[in-house]
Structures are given as structure tokens and as C-alpha cells.
Amino acid sequence: MAAMDLAYTPKVAAATAALYGKVASVVPRIEWPVHAPYVEAINRLKREKDAVILAHNYMTPEIFHCVADFVGDSLALAREAAKVDAKVIVQAGVHFMAETSKILSPDKIVLIPDVEAGCSLAASITAADVRLLKERYPGLPVVTYVNTSADVKAESDVCCTSSNAKAVVEDIAREKGVDTVIMIPDKYLARNVAKQTDVKVVTWEGSCEVHERFTAQDIESYRAANPGIVVLSHPECPPEVVAVSDFAGSTAAMISYVGDKRPKKVVMVTECSMSDNVAVEYPDVEFVRPCNLCPHMKRITLPKILHSLETMTTEVLVDPAVAVRARAAVERMLAVGKPR
Ligand code: 13P
Ligand code: SF4
């Protein structure tokens, strides 16, 4: 699209006014003329190309509230990818999420606006590592966090997200008749889950570079500076952080907590954009905003989403032989809790 087509014209201003109204509390007015032409162009191109945008909760508000068709945590995005009714999926998230969408929707075109959008957890383990773990612990099922490559998922018995990790661990242990599972690659998620169940976990030395930076002292400081504040943390945080939080759960679970309980003041111990996105929906709640950015999530921007739709790049492909095995692990996860 020519640069002149991306001007903030009165027509663009009118077409996007309602969307700006939605995000006005978190997107400064001075920034809107930069975002609005992209928002308008993306929403138009989506219709022309029969595309949907699946956006993770860590996307910036102008993506999350203004161009996304579906937003959620990793589990919700995987569920949506499995049933989405469009030719093209644009994954506004990181690479493993786009691979999961492709695994679940092999006939769709799955695009990622920046192919370098990785994840420290996904980068921490390879399929060869998993094969070695299986040799070392024969007979133990492998529970793999979705924050991994398709190759790693393909070596696994079942996947999990932070929404369903405990249920998945207990389900597979019951089914295989074992008291221990291998849970990869997030050592903190694994330890946090191990505290909630009798199933023992063998873990891997992976961590999320965003959540591992939070400390128990951080939580103490938030509480000291904000008496009565409710502290919500993500289970990718170290167990000592979760231990001093009021609630720990996936990004979607944190959002539900705020929606259900409407705390007066809250801190979400997770990636920066979460608070902005949730604050838009709950103006009555005051958010204290510690900020740990995920550099991978932040690679996804409006200009890159537009470029992705215009050029239909970068398409995410998964080797069909790998995809079949990875799909079995993801589908097994999606079936947990459903009658078999
Ligand atoms: P959830 O949204 O599934 O809680 O995951 C958080 C995350 O770090 C995804 O990269
Ligand atoms: Fe990976 Fe952590 Fe970024 Fe999520 S927040 S994509 S787990 S590095």
C-alpha cells in the first residue's frame, strides 16, 4: 500500500472514531493519527482476504482492541484456531502460537507478522532433548507446555497451557497409571503445578525471561506502597512470587479474576500490555503497572500486521509428519475435562 494511502484523513478519522473511543484511556490522543490509518487498512484488508486476527492478551491495546477478531490466552487461541472459519489466520502473538494454529488448522494459511517473534521457553528445548529425557526416564509421560516448537510437541504425550496444566498432569498420570510425569520446559510452571497436586514432576531448566524477573521483594514493595492491593501473578513466575500473591493463573484467569471480583486496586504480575488491555474493560479498577515487556510479543506491530496481510507473509508451515504427532498432543490437551 502506498504511504499516501496511510494518511490520517478525515475519512480515516471518522471510520476509526469509535475504536479510538474504546482505547482512549490507554492510547494517548497524539498517537492515534499514527495508528488509525493502519487500523482502518487492516480491518479493510481482513475482509478482502477472508482473514481473522487471533491476538494474545499481551498485544498492545491498538492491536488487541482495534484489529483483533479474537483475543485470549494460549488455550483460548488454540481452541479458536481449531474451529476458525476463515481462509487466513494472522497470529498476533509469537511463533509457537502460530505453529499451534497451523497444527490445528492445517488447511488454513497461517501468517505471522514477524517470524523472529520467539519465546525464551520455546528456545530452551529441542526435540533431541526430549528424546534424551524419555530415554532417561522410561515410561514417564511427557507433558509439554504449548510454549514450545512443533518438533518438541511431536515428541510429547500431551500439551498443556497455564490454564489447564494441573488438570492435564493429573489426567495423564491417571491414564498411564504413574505417579510422576516429565513436565517441560518451564521449571517454574512445573514447580507451581507440583505444589497443587500429588503427581510428582521431573522438570527442565527453562524459564520465561519476562516472568522470572519478578521477585517476592517486588510483591512486598507493591503491597507496602499500595495497602490493600490485590496481587495476581502468572504461574510462569518463580514459586516464591506465586506464594506471596493473592491469586495465580493464566492471563485469561487473571482477567476473569478482575471481572468477577472487581478489586479496588490490583497489580498483574505479568507482561506490561495486560494491564492496559484489561483497564479498558474495567475503568472502575485501579491498576498498578509494573512493567516487564516481552520483547518477542512486542515485535508484532500494526505496520507489520498490515504488511503481513498485503504480502501474505510470513506463512508458517509445519512438516506434515511432525504436525500429525504434534496435533495428537495438542488435541489430547483440548480433550482434557471433556467426556471421552
Ligand atoms: P497464557 O496467556 O496462556 O497465560 O500464557 C502466557 C504467555 O506467556 C504466553 O506466551
Ligand atoms: Fe515466551 Fe515469556 Fe514472552 Fe510468553 S512472555 S512469549 S513465555 S518469553
Image: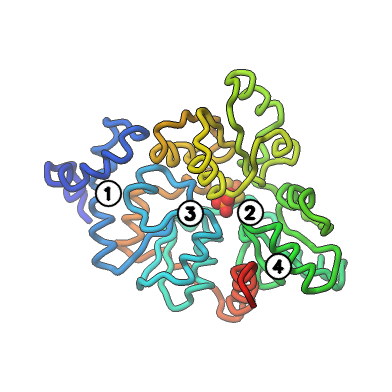
**Is there CB contact under 8 Å for labels 2 and 3?**
no
* Element under disc 4: helix
- Measured in 3D between alpha carbons, the distance from the residue under mark 3 to the one under mark 4, in whole angstroms, is 27 Å
Q: Nearer the viewer, mark 2 or mark 1?
A: 2
Q: Quadrant of residue 71?
A: bottom left
- Measured in 3D between alpha carbons, the distance from the residue under mark 2 to the one under mark 3, in whole angstroms, is 12 Å
Name the residue tied to disc 4: 127
Classify residue 302 as left or right of residue 229: left
Q: Nearer the viewer, mark 2 or mark 4?
A: 2
Mark 3 vs 1, N-terminal side: 1
* Count of residue discs: 4
Where residue 156 sits: x, y (%)? 71, 70
Mark number displayed over residue 162: 2
- Please say if 15 is above or below 336: above
- Measured in 3D between alpha carbons, the distance from the residue under mark 2 to the one under mark 1, in whole angstroms, is 33 Å
Q: Mark 3 near ligand 1 (CB under 8 Å)?
A: yes
Mark 2 vs 1, N-terminal side: 1
**Is there CB contact under 8 Å for labels 2 and 1?**
no
Name the residue tied to disc 1: 38
- Measured in 3D between alpha carbons, the distance from the residue under mark 3 to the one under mark 1, in whole angstroms, is 22 Å
Dot 2 surroundings within 10 Å: few (below 14), some, or many (20 or more)? many
Q: Amino acid at mark 4?
A: Ala
Name the residue tied to disc 3: 72
- The residue at 54%/66% (across/down) is 100
Q: Residue furthest front?
A: 261
Q: Nearer the viewer, mark 3 or mark 1?
A: 3
Q: Mark 2 near ligand 1 (CB under 8 Å)?
A: yes
Q: Amino acid at mark 3?
A: Gly
Q: Quadrant of residue 220?
A: top right
